[in-house]
Amino acid sequence: MKISTFFLVLIVIFSCNSKKEPQQVRMTEQEVTERLTNANKHRVQKESEEIEEFIKQHKFSTERTGTGLRIQIYGRAKNGVSPVAHDEVQIVCKVFLLDGTLCYETDTTNPVAFKLGEGMQIRGLEEGIMTMIPGESARLIIPNHLAYGLSGDGDKIPPGAALFIDVKLLK
């Protein structure tokens, strides 16, 4: 009898001390979508504000395209034709984060050559180049969705980074 009473007391003690599992909050698919949409809108708005502040600090006079690319062409060429998809182009450029960190740089002794529209370069750079003519230089401020997106480039460009690219179209 003493043993069964002892076990009964132990069971009562341990059952009273057991921690309850937190209840799981179940959300509908619509609630999940709404939360993710709102979080994305907030992130995009914050990035847009950072880009506008960058432009203001540097006193750039940029135009905004429908995709969100900001571009300022300087060092205008007198004549020429803008490249189109599948044209091979040669450029020199410097790629910066908005905090001023230089990530990549090329020069005229080692220009970058590629065909437009074939996914060899980020979309924002290709879009900017298609507004230029050979000999022109441009400042491109590229939001992350036109650059390396939420994953970065796995090297010098971190996830979610907007970029500033100073580019010259050679040919």
Image (spheres, helix red, strand yellow):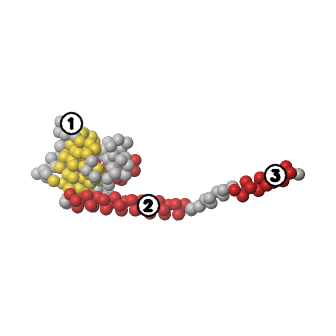
Mark number displayed over residue 55: none
Asked if the residues shown at circle 1 and circle 2 are in contact, with their CB atoms under 8 angstroms apart, the answer is: no
In percent of width and height, residue 44 lies at 37, 59
- The answer to whether residue 40 is seen in the rendering is yes
- The amino acid at mark 3 is Phe
- The amino acid at mark 2 is Ala
Closer to the camera in the image, 142 or 97 = 97
- The answer to whether residue 118 is seen in the rendering is no
Mark number displayed over residue 6: 3
Q: Is 70 left or right of 159, judged from the image as shown?
A: left
| Label 2 secondary element | helix
User: Badge 1 is on which residue?
Assistant: 110
User: Badge 2 is on which residue?
Assistant: 39
Label 2 crowd bin: few (<14), some (14–19), many (20+), radius 10 Å: few
Q: Is 76 left or right of 147, judged from the image as shown?
A: left
Q: Is 170 left or right of 30, judged from the image as shown?
A: left
| Label 3 secondary element | helix
Q: Nearer the viewer, mark 1 or mark 3?
A: 3
Looking at the image, which residue sits at the far top? 109
Q: Earlier in the sequence, mark 1 or mark 3?
A: 3
